[in-house]
Image (tube, rainbow, N blue to C red):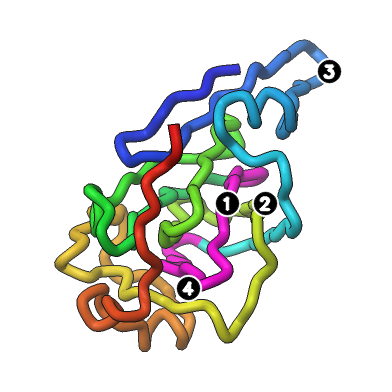
């Protein structure tokens, strides 16, 4: 199993060991001790599963006080998965990182608390499962505009299918006073 630090502090790409033979494959999709040793929390309180058609874009979402870390993987199809640092005062505030996650590559992305998350489906459809370190609180969630020019995400889709919430999302600059503050990690 490989744990590859992302360009943004706390973001980690996980490449699990996949054992294949004539019967199919086997892999560990989560191992608390191994993940904890590399800084990924072992306490996840909620698992989510979504299915979306091609060109669907979900996000960018974050919670303001009940900050969620997310461990994202794809069980069917392929997505372009994105993390955006939205912690006021962070040296990487407003920067983003994107990776391809698919049912073929088995990769996972850990997105730490204080980051916004979104993804778009690049295959015919995709099923995404992700673990969360905090419970979903609808009144605590905000949506950030998927194509905010101050963030500048290069999405592989130009005219995505969006939820009404995501269509009405505000730009990052309009949300500054509400965003979480950066807390430098203790060494």
Spatial distance from mark 1 to mark 3, Cα to Cα?
Answer: 31 Å
Spatial distance from mark 4 to mark 1, Cα to Cα?
Answer: 15 Å
Whether 70 is among the magenta residues is yes
Instruction: Sort mark 4 into few (<14), some (14-19) or many (20+) by Cα contacts within 10 Å.
Output: many
Q: Nearer the viewer, residue 25 or 165?
A: 165
In the picture of the structure, the residue carrying the numbered disc 2 is: 131
Viewer-side label of 1, 3: 1
Instruction: Sort mark 2 into few (<14), some (14-19) or many (20+) by Cα contacts within 10 Å.
Output: many
State the extent of the magenta-drawn residues as a range. 54-76
The residue lying at 63 percent from left, 77 percent from top is 137
Where is residue 76 shown, x and y percent of the image? 64, 46
In the picture of the structure, the residue carrying the numbered disc 4 is: 64
In the picture of the structure, the residue carrying the numbered disc 1 is: 70
Spatial distance from mark 2 to mark 1, Cα to Cα?
Answer: 5 Å
Q: Secondary structure at mark 3?
A: loop
Sequence order check, earlier mark of 4 and 2: 4
Q: Which mark is residue 23?
A: 3
Viewer-side label of 4, 2: 4
Instruction: Sort mark 1 into few (<14), some (14-19) or many (20+) by Cα contacts within 10 Å.
Output: many
Answer above or below: position of 119 versus 25: below
Name the magenta segment's main secondary structure. strand
Spatial distance from mark 4 to mark 2, Cα to Cα?
Answer: 18 Å
Q: Nearer the viewer, residue 48 or 32?
A: 32
């Amino acid at each position: 199993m490989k744990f590859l630090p992302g360009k943004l502090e706390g973001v980690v790409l996980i490449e699990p060991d996949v054992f294949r033979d004539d019967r199919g494959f086997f892999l560990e999709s989560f191992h608390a001790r191994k993940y904890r040793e590399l800084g990924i929390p072992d306490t996840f309180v909620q698992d989510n599963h979504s299915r979306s058609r091609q060109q669907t874009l979900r996000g960018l979402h974050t919670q303001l006080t009940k900050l969620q870390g997310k461990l994202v993987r794809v069980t069917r199809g392929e997505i372009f998965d994105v993390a955006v640092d939205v912690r006021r005062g962070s040296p990487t505030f407003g920067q983003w990182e994107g990776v391809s996650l698919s049912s073929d590559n088995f990769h996972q992305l850990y997105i730490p608390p204080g980051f916004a998350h979104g993804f778009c489906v690049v295959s015919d459809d995709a099923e995404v499962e992700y673990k969360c370190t905090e419970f979903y609180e609808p009144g605590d969630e905000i949506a950030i505009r998927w194509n905010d020019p101050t963030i500048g995400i290069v999405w592989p889709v130009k005219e995505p299918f969006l939820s009404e919430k995501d269509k009405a999302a505000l730009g990052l600059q309009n949300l500054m006073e509400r965003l979480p503050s950066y807390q430098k990690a203790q060494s």
